Amino acid sequence: MRCGKLLGICLFAVLFFVGITACRAEEKENMLTSSAFSRGNDYYEKGEYVKAIEEYEEIRASGMESGAMYYNLGNAYFKMGELGEAVLNYERAKRIMPRDADLINNCKFARRKIKGGLVPEKGLWNWRPLRLYSENFTADEFTWLASGAFALVIIFLCVMIVRPATKRYLLIVCLLIFVFVLINAVIVWHEVVEKRASAVTTAEKAEVLFGPFDSATKFFTIQEGMKVIVLQEKNGWYKIKRADGKTGWIKRDVVEKI
Amino acid sequence: MKKILVTLALLTSFFAAHAAGEDVRFEAALESNRVSIGNPIYMYLTLYGEKDVNVPEMPPINGLQIKYVGPFTKISVVNGRVSQSVKYTYLVIPRKEGEYKIGPFFVETRGEVYKAEAVELSVSRMPQRPATVSGPVSSAVSSANSRTMSAQQTQYGGNRIFLVMDVEKNRLYINEVVPVTIKVYVDALGLKDIEYPTYSHEGFSVDEFSEPERTQEVRRGARYDVLVFRQNLFGIKEGDYVIGPAHLRCKMVVKRAIPGQSAISSRSVFDDDFFKRRFGSDVYPVELEADAVPITVLPFPEEGRPSGFQGAVGSFGLEVSVEPVKAKVGDPITLRMTVSGSGSLDTVTAPLFKPTDDIKTYEPRATKKGNRKIYEQVIIPKTDKVTEIPEVSFTFFNPVTERYMTVQKGPFPVEVVKQPESEQMVKMVSMPGVEQIFYPQEEIGSDIIHIKENAGRLCPEGPFLCQKPLFWAGQFMLLALAMGFYGIYKRRERILTDKGYARFLKAPRKARAGMARARACLGHDNVLLFYDAVFKTLQEYLGNRFNLPKGSVTGQIIENRLKPAGCDERILEMLRSVFSGCEMARYAPLTPGKHEEVEMLEKVKKIIDYLEKTRLKENGRRV
């Protein structure tokens, strides 16, 4: 009995020590990244955008990210005149803080600068109500929403079991919530798939070809900052799809995945 | 009345007496011996000296359609001599080209047969040209601006209906407008359902046909009713072209003769009233054709071609007005440029003027009014330095003089003043009774919004929440909890409603308590107490296990139920031994030892353990 108590105390001590160490390491990491962020901001305000970019990129290289970091990085690239990189980082920031008004404004502003204008998007995901809903939450927020709604369905089912008289009303409510869960699940799936496949053109202008080789016929052109979907990868080439549905092959270094 | 009747009888007998003395003869005649396909002519069979005969029969002739129109009887008295005749009118419509012989014809009257000689008709494909037409079409149109009638035919020998297409010029420049006139000539025939003429016009652009005009025209001494179609066309590409032949479809109405009236009416063929009263008329569809006309479209001469020439062809004038001539900076000034004259207005573009840096211009707006084309251009002076609107010029090619011409107007003086200070402000407050406050009109800049001061929540880049196994474990746990809740609830519900099930569930617990009681009595002097506890424990357990009244549980009943349920024979034997042992200890004066008691307790434990672990079948139901 005494031995068991001793073992328990030892285990608690080890866990406490590990926890404290981990917290301190994370705190230290956060301090480092925060200081890099502050330095980046200082450089930005002095107009030294290259240095600011280096600081922000350092945070990213450490494996940490935040919406504000991507936002500031996008701003610095925009000031440098690198529209493609600016849009790319704004898009990355949108995945973390989609409702940020400053970000929405800057992203729109940068997109207006795309040469030749934006290519009109096609398909179900461009349906305005769905787009407005899906653009206002992150994928994780949608997941929590779906999960919460699922829990609510289960609670209502339990209530129905205990109080069969409520079945008549709660069944309809459950069905509606379940539809909501499904919609959210589809949006999450789309966000996850899109994140894996979305990319932004970082080169000033790029020609999209009919095949993954240099001598292939030119099909269409994508401008810097234009968003595309990567469908396939082959020998240093991406098969991409433009917003209007046109597909073609492009060299891998011309676009960067979000 | 009697007097009138007597007079009429006398006159009739008088005419009959005199007529009887007249020679009877029968003659056939055609309106014309030469005709083109589709053009109808009349044929007359006239019997002189008689009038009471049957209508002569007309044999069918391949290539000709012959329709009887009606009779016309004529009686005349000259110097007391009475002559009478009856004329039978037929309409002959040629359908095929060739030479035809119609007749001879025979009539019988008063026992005598009279013969009319056959008539000859020559039917040609194209309308017959008069001898006066000068040469072939190509030679007739050789002169550049001479008024030639390519398909002009002053008279078509005997044709009552024909179509003529006129083109005013046969050599014209690109975009030069030339009117085309297509005329339908009709002589004493009725027409209905007249369609617009059609003709091929490759290399030309055409306007809409104007409303057809009705008129009368005398050609070679004959008066025709004429329906005139007019249309403008202009060449769009240089080269030699042929327009036509023109075709026109209509329906020809031929009135049947009624006694005392000629079959051929002299009234206007396009008079509707005439057709409204056309009792007894025949309708024939006809398609008229006019000759094709060759036209040469010339390119614009390169020589002397001004840089401002934009393709306008014709003879135009230019009028320009500026309104208002006094304006403030930023206020619109309208430059109204009116191009009018003869020629295609479709080829007229906006007159040119060179805007300066001080003025801002918008695309001119064009409107057409008759033979005028008006361009309205809005000009906005940017500064008060603007003193005039630059000169406006319009260049066109005159096909008559074959030269380019440029019309220039302006410059137009204007007075531009600065905006008053008050108008440069934006009114921000406007409430009745409150002094209006003006603020300077601010210029709104545009740029990206400044960077964020705080880094926000920095977290490691990782997968989405939905890609984490812990999240899915949580979801499944939630589902498992729900299912567990359902199971527990249903079990509780069954316990409350199913007494047998409730007893079945509490059987092992009660058995364990009974066994504890029996074990407590083990080794005591009072053996009866031990065996009583063992018996009651087993009895209670089996009663609960099989939902039987406690008192009814005996060794025999259990054997009767357990054996058919497939219970192990060894357990049954143990059960029998326990029951008999308890019976003997409780009712027989026998004192078993402690060893037997332990063995008994062990048997009961084994029986209970077996029955707890084994699911027996009773009446096909597992218990």
Image (spheres, coloured by chain):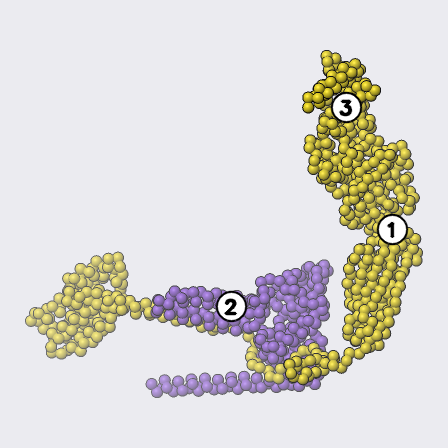
Residue that badge 3 annotates:
B74
Between the residue at mark 3 and the residue at mark 1, the CA separation in whole angstroms equals 61 Å
Q: Position of residue A45 (x, y in %)?
A: 68, 84
Q: Amino acid at mark 3?
A: Lys
Q: Amino acid at mark 1?
A: Tyr
Q: In the rendered image, which quarter is residue B256 located in? A: top right
Q: In the rendered image, which quarter is residue B418 located in? A: bottom right
Q: Are marks 3 and 2 in contact (CB under 8 Å)?
A: no
Q: Position of residue B162 (x, y in %)?
A: 80, 36
Task: Write down which chain is painted purple.
Answer: A
Q: Amino acid at mark 2?
A: Asn
Q: Quadrant of the N terminus of chain B?
A: top right
Residue that badge 2 annotates:
A184
Secondary-structure class at tag 3: strand
Task: Write down which chain is painted yellow.
Answer: B
Between the residue at mark 3 and the residue at mark 2, the CA separation in whole angstroms equals 104 Å
Between the residue at mark 1 and the residue at mark 2, the CA separation in whole angstroms equals 70 Å
Categorize mark 1 by other alpha carbons within 10 Å: few (<14), some (14-19), many (20+).
many
